[in-house]
Amino acid sequence: MEQAREAAARGVRAIVRRLSSDRLHSAAALIVFLALWEGAVRLGYQDEFWVSRPTLVVDKIGEWLQDGTLSTNLVRTMRIAATAFLISAVGAVVVGSAFARLRWIDDVLGWYVDIVYAVPKPALVPLFLFAFGLGDTPKFLLVVLLVFFVFYYNVRAGLATSKQSHRDALLMLGASERDVWVNLTLPTLVPFLVASARLSAALAILGTVFAEFFSYTPGMGRLVISAQYALDATSLLSVVTVLTMVGVLVDNLLRRFDRRVSSWRL
Amino acid sequence: MAAVKDRSGARYRSSVWLGRTLILVGLLAFFEVAPGRWLDELLVAQPSAIGRTLGEWMGLDGGDAVLWGAIRSTLGRAAGGLIIGTVLGLVAAFLVWRSKHIANLFEPVAAVVNSVPRIVLVPLFILWLGSGLAPIMVYVVGTAFFPIFYNVLQGLRSSDRVMLDSLRVMGAQDRDLLSAYLVPHSREYALAALMISAPLTLVSTIVGEMLMSAGGLGGLLVASRNDFDTDGIYAATLVAASLGVVTNVAVRSWNTKQRSRALEAEGL
């Protein structure tokens, strides 16, 4: 018991030490804000029905965790986001590298890619829903489109930075195209890919949620819409909280991964 | 070198344009023929039918010209949100840069608010602010605010301390610092932010209109879908897409012009 407490105290100290003053500041500001909110509602300055309060949100999330609402909806949303994200990322790398090699194709089709890039993607959702029904296809399409361009343009930028002289040197030393790809091109691309992943991970999740607003299939988006119809501020804030936490978590994981794979870059 | 020469050659260029045109014509022809044969005509509209609907929306058949009103209100909201968000972002960036206290208070809050998924907040704004224009505008202003705030703040923070101190010693007030040094210095950062935020505000406006069915292009999109108006939904999507492309091109060419003007001013 004594040992456990000591270990816990050591853990807390270690966390506090690792937090920079910036982070402490953010945490303090957040806590003060939440306390003011809770207080204002409890003391009757604000109406609980409209603005809810932090402890109600925590209770709601706890309730969702217990009855499985959260796991069902969040897993479903995340699964679609992740699948579409991966398909799109791989597709963009393939298309981007292919276009970089095939000049004429790039000049012809790349022009269309640039045009589609400028299209407001969420505006395509009603069309997707109309043409492909209320299932998962519209969500997939939206996320694939959102993620594709981030990876595509980053891959193009990454390939542009890889030096022709390095390539020539490798080829002269008898490397095959495959060797060049594995030993030169891919390592040059990795930081660009990680940067794309960080930029587009949140897009993938939010794109899925947005499409779910309109598609009436289980997922975080439908939780939002049913809460909106029920004028249920607590549930809305709970979804916002959960999605914020997921977003921050995913970004942290990717940042860690970034630090690991690009440690050699200094 | 041969490849570069090849690429700029007139023959190469015309072959590229031929390729682009052939693809476009091919797609149009396919979708003109396919509905009813290989694709469900209830779900896929023919380009000619889309064109006809667009003509109706422009009032060419003597009816109501709904299209111009929708475009005007979407562009108006987007522009209004962009201007308000940009002004707020500039003021906030200056205040945060100027005062350590404000920075300590505001920056952590901004970081938290910025990491919240904005799109999920729209239903909450609707709950709080009613179904008028307010929720859309809050969302659009929020979209425009953060790029300009963070970019300009970075620009201000990268300003030369020695230069600022010397200007102050020579008796410069805040206003003089701004006009003589800070604004020209942060200009590039602001322009870069606008490149991002201008197209984004258009997207946000359409998204807001879709979620609230509040007129504009977003409202038009949702309404045509709810009416199962096949031609209408393709036409509305086409208009929204074109508006996005036009905005992007406009922002880019405006940005290049501003940059070249800035270079001229520096005597380059």
Image (cartoon, coloured by chain):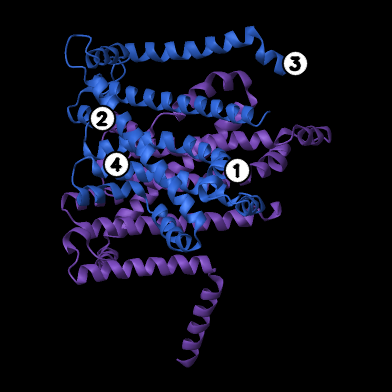
The residue pinned by badge 2 equals: B216
Task: Decide if residue A168 is on the left or right side of residue A84.
Answer: right
Read off the chain for label 2: B
The single residue placed furthest to the bottom in the displayed view is A2
Q: Earlier in the sequence, mark 2 or mark 4?
A: 4
Q: Chain of mark 3?
A: B
Q: Does residue A38 lie above or below A49 as drawn?
A: below
Judging by colour alone, the chain drawn in purple in this rendered image is A
Give the residue type that dot 2 points to: Gly
Secondary element at tag 2: helix
User: Which residue sits at x=55%, y=42%?
Assistant: B186
**Rendering colour (chain B):** blue
Return the residue at label 4: B137
Residue to which mark 3 is pinned:
B2
The answer to which of marks 3 and 4 sits earlier in the sequence is 3
Residue at 51% of width from left, 54% of height from top?
A: B97
Secondary structure under tag 1 reads helix
Vertical arrangement, residue A77 with respect to residue A89, above or below: below
Q: Which residue is mark 1?
A: A192
Amino acid bearing label 4: Met
The residue positioned 34% from the left and 59% from the top of the image is A241
Q: Picture quarter containing residue B261?
A: top right
Q: Specify the amino acid type for callout 3.
A: Ala
Q: Which residue sits at x=72%, y=42%? A: A183
* Of pointers 3 and 2, the one earlier in the residue sequence: 3
In the picture, the quarter occupied by the C terminus of chain B is: top right
Q: Nearer the viewer, mark 3 or mark 2?
A: 2
